[in-house]
């Protein structure tokens, strides 16, 4: 079945929702969000787990085609409030440096808040990097990452925890688009992650590996297949792995035909982790 926003979330409001069953049953929930101003709709999964630490692999402020990110955090506790802190880190392929500052916000039980990058004065502009979300207690939460820019709205789930490998079910490197970019966030606080991407053809046969790419602690870098020797007209899958088992968050962006800088607006999704 499907549910439209009801009387608990009036027009113009920004809300969170908890979906439950009685008696308890297993659910698979997808959120479908209509775009404004003619923008394409966005979809993302509801969370089935929660954690007091979360990660956003790709965060932008006035980047490319005026792309901006909202890191949205919900306090899932029924009774306890918490201070949420979002710490921003740079991109390993730019000269912005690693640590870019921390923003905080008090969240009552079941409350939600979006850290919208254009409103964060402490974050440089333009900015390309990643973020880490923490709470000041054992209160747990969930993280959603949304992006707006160039008439496109995208949303992905933030990572509650990463793993040393991630699998990508579909990748492209077509000459006339789409093309896939893989953003990899190193979630470790002190270890550099040496990362490889293994590419496979549609029949499962191995195509080639790209790497190694060193990623500093808490930072991210994007591996653009078309700049790293992958043949054109490639359509297949991939595996992202760290040599030392460092925890990674992996996000895939599919680029449409470019109209300017920063055109990764076709689609976005998380890499699947074991």
Image (tube, grey):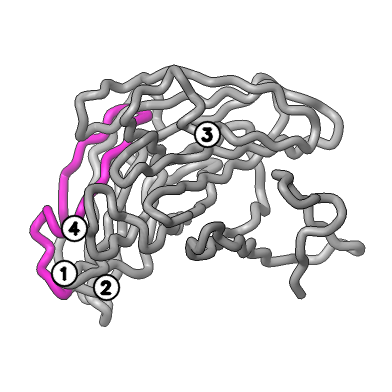
Q: Is residue 137 magenta?
A: no
Q: Is residue 217 magenta?
A: yes
Distance between mark 3 and mark 1 Cα atoms:
40 Å
Residue at the bottom extreme, as displayed: 203
Lower position in the chain sequence, tag 2 or tag 1: 1
Judged by depth in the image, the label closer to the viewer, 2 or 1, is: 2
Q: Which mark is drawn over residue 106?
A: none
Which of the 4 quarters of the picture holds residue 36? Answer: bottom right
Residue at 10% x, 68% y: name it: 231
Disc 3 to disc 2: CB gap under 8 Å: no
Disc 3 to disc 1: CB gap under 8 Å: no
Disc 4 to disc 2: CB gap under 8 Å: no
Query: Which range is magenta?
Result: 210-233
For label 2, the residue is 236
Q: Which mark is drawn over residue 225?
A: 4
Residue at 37% x, 68% y: name it: 169
Tell me if 114 is positioned left or right of 196 in this view.
Answer: right
Expressed as whole percent of the image width and height from the top left, the position of residue 65 reads: 31, 46
Tell me if 64 is positioned left or right of 17 in this view.
Answer: left
Expressed as whole percent of the image width and height from the top left, the position of residue 249 reads: 41, 44
Distance between mark 4 and mark 2 Cα atoms:
12 Å
How crowded pointer 2 is (Cα within 10 Å; few <14, some 14-19, many 20+) is rated as many
Lower position in the chain sequence, tag 4 or tag 1: 1
Lower position in the chain sequence, tag 3 or tag 2: 3
For label 3, the residue is 116
Looking at the image, which is closer to me, 212 or 86? 86
Distance between mark 3 and mark 2 Cα atoms:
35 Å
Quick one: SS at disc 1? strand
Looking at the image, which is closer to me, 125 or 225? 125
For label 1, the residue is 207
């Amino acid at each position: 079945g499907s549910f439209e926003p009801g009387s608990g979330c009036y027009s113009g409001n920004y809300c969170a929702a908890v979906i439950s069953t009685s008696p308890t049953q297993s659910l698979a929930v997808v959120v479908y969000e209509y775009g404004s101003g003619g923008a394409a709709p966005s979809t993302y999964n509801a969370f089935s787990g929660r954690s007091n630490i979360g990660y956003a692999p790709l965060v932008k402020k006035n980047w490319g085609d005026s792309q901006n990110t909202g890191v949205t955090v919900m306090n899932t506790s029924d009774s306890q409030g918490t201070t949420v802190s979002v710490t921003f880190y740079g991109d390993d392929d730019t000269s912005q440096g690693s640590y870019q500052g921390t923003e905080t916000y008090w969240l009552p039980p079941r409350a939600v808040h979006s850290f919208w990058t254009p409103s964060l004065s402490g974050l440089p502009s333009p900015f390309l990097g990643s973020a880490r979300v923490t709470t000041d207690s054992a209160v747990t939460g969930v993280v959603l990452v949304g992006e707006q820019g160039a008439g496109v709205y995208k949303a992905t789930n933030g990572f509650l925890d990463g793993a040393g490998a991630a699998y990508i079910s579909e990748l492209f490197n077509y000459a006339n688009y789409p093309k896939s970019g893989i953003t990899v966030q190193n979630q470790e606080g002190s270890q550099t992650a040496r990362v490889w991407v293994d590419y496979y053809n549609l029949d499962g046969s191995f195509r080639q590996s790209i790497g190694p790419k060193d990623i500093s602690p808490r930072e991210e870098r994007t591996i653009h297949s078309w700049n790293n020797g992958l043949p054109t007209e490639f359509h297949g899958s991939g595996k992202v792995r760290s040599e030392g088992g460092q925890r990674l968050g992996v996000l895939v962006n599919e680029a449409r035909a470019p109209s300017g800088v920063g055109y990764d607006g076709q689609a976005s999704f998380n890499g699947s982790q074991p």
